[in-house]
Every structure is written in structure tokens, then in C-alpha cells.
């Protein structure tokens, strides 16, 4: 199951496994329910409360009620013994891919938080300034989000246009960006915020007050 991108760590006890699980970041846990030094249900509940890492159980023959209980406790799926190595590898790879996809999605939608002054939520396309929502159009939100993702970095009009207009044909790039920045600045100024600064001859940058 190991490949160029996978490091495998094996633990002989539940206590050791839990300690490593809490301290390290893993993309998959394969848990044998025969570990006898701690109740499997309790291990699952602790792991699930702590992180969203997928958990694959290796079990002996178990009733449908027992499987439901294990899944409710936090397992993502299970394989009964005797194991098929091919099935185990396929299940493990599928869970790892789901985890990676979830992490990518999470990072794309991760909120940008600058204390209580500014919160930008890409998932809900919401901006909170000093505890109050700031109404923005779609492109105004995308512009502010682009700036906030690159604080202090000077961005050219071409870079901003590519980010906001994406695959739309480039038409009057300078004027389109200048007009959008003017509108966003006006809305920010209405709540006494002046985050967007000009860098003469280069572009703009996003600066938060100290």
C-alpha cells in the first residue's frame, strides 16, 4: 500500500496510537478492533471528536447492529477478516483521496480572519467588518478576497483582472479594474476602512492597520 507519497506509521497500543494521532497529521487511520487495551468505541469517539481524518476499521465478523454502532461512533468504513489485500488497498486509497479532496475544498473556502475587525467567509460569500455585515456585489467580494489572501503584496491590474473575471475575454482591463476598486473603496470608506493602497506605476496592495 505504500507509494512515493505515503509514510506508514504502526502503533502496537491504543494509547500510543491516540497520542500520535493527536500530535501528528494523518490522511488515514486503519484501526484493528482487536486492540484490547482500550475499548474500540471509545477510541473511535475520541478520534472523531478530535479530527476529521478518515478511519478504516479491520473487524472480525460482526452483526449489522454492531456495524451501525461502529459507524455511528466515527468509523468511515470497515473490512471484515480474513482480509483481502486488494480490497484493503482500494478502500484505503479511496479514503485518502476523499480526505485530500476535502482538504483542498476546505482550504479554498477557509475564512480569512483579522481579529474582530475583518472576517471574510468565501463559503458564504460574506464580509463582516467590526461585527457588522458589509454588502458587496459578487465582483466586489472577489476583489476584496483576492487582496486579503495576499496582504502586503502588490498586485497589478492584469493579475486582479485574471482573478476576478477569470475566463471572460479581456476587455478594457485597466478601466474595469479601476472602476471596481473605486466601488469597493467607497463601500469600505463608508465603514471607515482604507485597506487598499496604490503603488504608483505597479498596482495595488492590501494593508491592514497595525
Image (cartoon, rainbow, N blue to C red):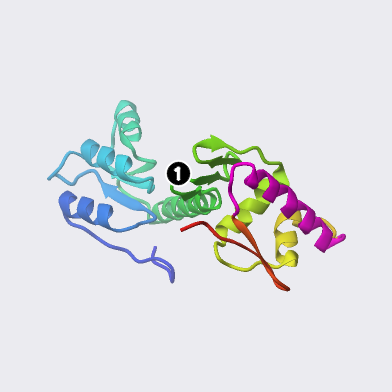
Q: Is residue 198 above or below residue 95?
A: below
Which quadrant is home to the N terminus? bottom left
Q: Position of residue 197 (x, y in %)?
A: 63, 62
Q: Residue at x 81, y 56 (%)?
A: 176
Q: In this view, does 23 lie above or below 40?
A: below
Query: Depth check: 165 or 51 in front?
Result: 165
Q: Where is residue 75 in the image (x, y as percent from the top left)?
A: 34, 40
Q: Name the residue under label 1.
A: 116
Indicate the secondary structure of the residue bearing disc 1: loop
Q: Is residue 205 above or below residue 201?
A: above
What secondary structure is the magenta-colored segment mainly?
Answer: helix
Query: Depth check: 156 or 179 in front?
Result: 179
List the single residue furthest toward the top: 65
Q: Residue at x 24, y 36 (%)?
A: 41
Q: In which quarter of the image is residue 8?
A: bottom left
Residue 76 included in the magenta stretch of the image: no
Residue 191 included in the magenta stretch of the image: yes
Can the viewer see residue 165? yes
Query: Depth check: 163 or 1 in front?
Result: 163
Q: Which residue is drawn at 54% across and 50% down?
A: 105
Query: Depth check: 107 or 127 in front?
Result: 127
Q: Where is residue 146 in the image (x, y as percent from the top left)?
A: 62, 56
Can the viewer see residue 60? no
- The residue range painted magenta reads 171-194
Q: Residue at x 71, y 43 (%)?
A: 138
Amino acid at each position: 500500500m505504500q507509494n512515493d507519497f505515503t509514510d506508514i506509521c504502526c502503533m502496537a497500543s491504543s494509547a500510543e496510537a491516540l497520542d500520535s494521532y493527536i500530535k501528528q497529521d494523518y490522511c488515514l487511520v486503519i484501526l484493528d478492533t482487536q486492540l484490547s487495551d482500550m475499548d474500540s468505541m471509545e477510541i473511535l469517539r475520541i478520534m472523531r471528536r478530535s479530527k476529521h481524518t478518515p478511519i478504516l476499521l479491520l473487524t472480525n465478523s460482526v452483526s449489522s447492529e454492531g456495524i451501525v454502532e461502529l459507524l455511528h461512533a466515527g468509523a468511515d468504513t470497515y473490512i471484515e477478516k480474513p482480509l483481502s489485500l486488494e480490497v484493503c488497498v482500494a478502500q484505503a486509497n479511496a479514503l485518502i483521496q476523499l480526505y485530500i479532496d476535502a482538504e483542498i475544498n476546505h482550504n479554498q473556502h477557509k475564512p480569512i480572519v483579522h481579529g474582530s475587525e475583518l472576517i471574510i467567509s468565501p463559503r458564504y460569500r460574506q464580509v463582516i467588518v467590526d461585527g457588522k455585515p458589509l454588502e458587496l456585489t459578487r465582483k466586489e467580494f472577489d476583489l476584496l478576497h483576492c487582496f486579503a489572501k495576499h496582504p502586503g503584496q502588490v498586485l497589478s491590474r492584469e493579475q486582479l483582472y485574471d482573478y476576478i473575471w477569470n475566463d471572460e475575454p479581456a476587455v478594457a482591463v485597466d478601466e474595469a479594474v479601476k472602476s471596481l476598486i473605486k466601488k469597493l473603496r467607497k463601500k469600505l470608506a463608508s465603514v471607515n476602512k482604507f485597506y487598499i493602497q496604490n503603488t504608483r506605476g505597479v498596482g495595488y496592495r492590501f494593508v491592514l492597520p497595525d
